[in-house]
Amino acid sequence: MDLLDFDAQDLYFECEDPPEVQVLIKEAGESYGSGDGELPLLQAYLRAPESLNVLVALNRFYYYRHRLREALLISEKALAIIRAGLAFPEDWRQLNLDLLGSIPSAHLTRVRLYLFTLKSIGFLHMRLDNLELSRNIFEKLVELDVKDRIGAQGLLELVVERQVHV
């Protein structure tokens, strides 16, 4: 399966949130520089906990503030939401090429979002020195993405290198 061979459909950011959530996300973006963006993002999350727009904004906020544990929690929440929409198994280790190949092409954008979110989780685990879990995630991504469209191969090499020097 070529993860770039698809029509972009069902993009998460095209899903419109309620107006009050949109206002809160905008407010958070405008107050990011002062460090006051967290409260409006949390308020948006309380109003729309399943919104990928909110979760992506929260993830970015925490990541760029070097609050990696919080970013990881948000990424895991996003993965669970995306997974449910695809009827993927709860444990990403159970994913295989046959399962990915059975997904209708209309949902390939969601599959890519799932895989990129899993990559994000692997990256955050790497940054938090959970190297074995990070390596397992990147190995799974390399197995599923034989053309390395997601870009996990380089991260896998980095983790392996770090494990050798630990």
Image (spheres, rainbow, N blue to C red):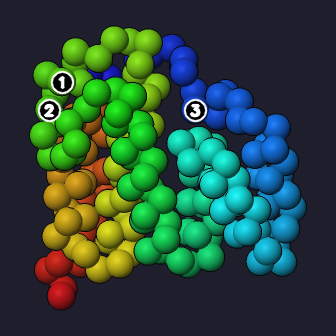
Q: Which residue is labeled 1 in the image?
A: 99
Answer with mark 1 or mark 3, whichever residue precedes in sequence: 3
Answer with mark 2 or mark 3, whichever residue precedes in sequence: 3
Amino acid type at mark 2: Asn
Regarding residue 150, the answer to whether it shows in the image is no
Residue at mark 1 to residue at mark 3: CA–CA distance = 22 Å
Residue at mark 1 to residue at mark 2: CA–CA distance = 5 Å
Q: Which mark is residue 96?
A: 2
* Side (left or right) of 51 relative to 91: right
Quadrant in the rendering for residue 143: top left
Q: Which mark is residue 12?
A: 3
Quadrant in the rendering for residue 133: bottom left
Q: Are marks 1 and 2 in contact (CB under 8 Å)?
A: yes
Amino acid type at mark 1: Leu
**54 up-or-down from 97: above or below:** below
| Residue drawn at the location 63% of the way across and 54% of the way down | 45
Instruction: Find residue 155 and report its horizontal and vertical position in percent.
Output: 32, 60
Crowd rating for badge 2 (residues with CA inside 10 Å; few <14, some 14–19, many 20+): few
Q: Secondary structure at mark 2?
A: loop
Regarding residue 14, the answer to whether it shows in the image is yes
Residue at mark 2 to residue at mark 3: CA–CA distance = 24 Å
Instruction: Find residue 19 and report its horizontal and vertical position in percent.
Output: 82, 38
| Residue drawn at the location 39% of the way across and 46% of the way down | 79
Q: Secondary structure at mark 1?
A: helix
Crowd rating for badge 3 (residues with CA inside 10 Å; few <14, some 14–19, many 20+): some
Q: Quadrant of the C terminus?
A: bottom left
Crowd rating for badge 1 (residues with CA inside 10 Å; few <14, some 14–19, many 20+): few
Q: Is label 2 or label 3 in front? A: 3
Q: Quadrant of the N terminus?
A: top left
Q: Secondary structure at mark 3?
A: helix
- For this rendering, which residue is in front, 2 or 126? 126
Furthest-bottom residue in view?
166
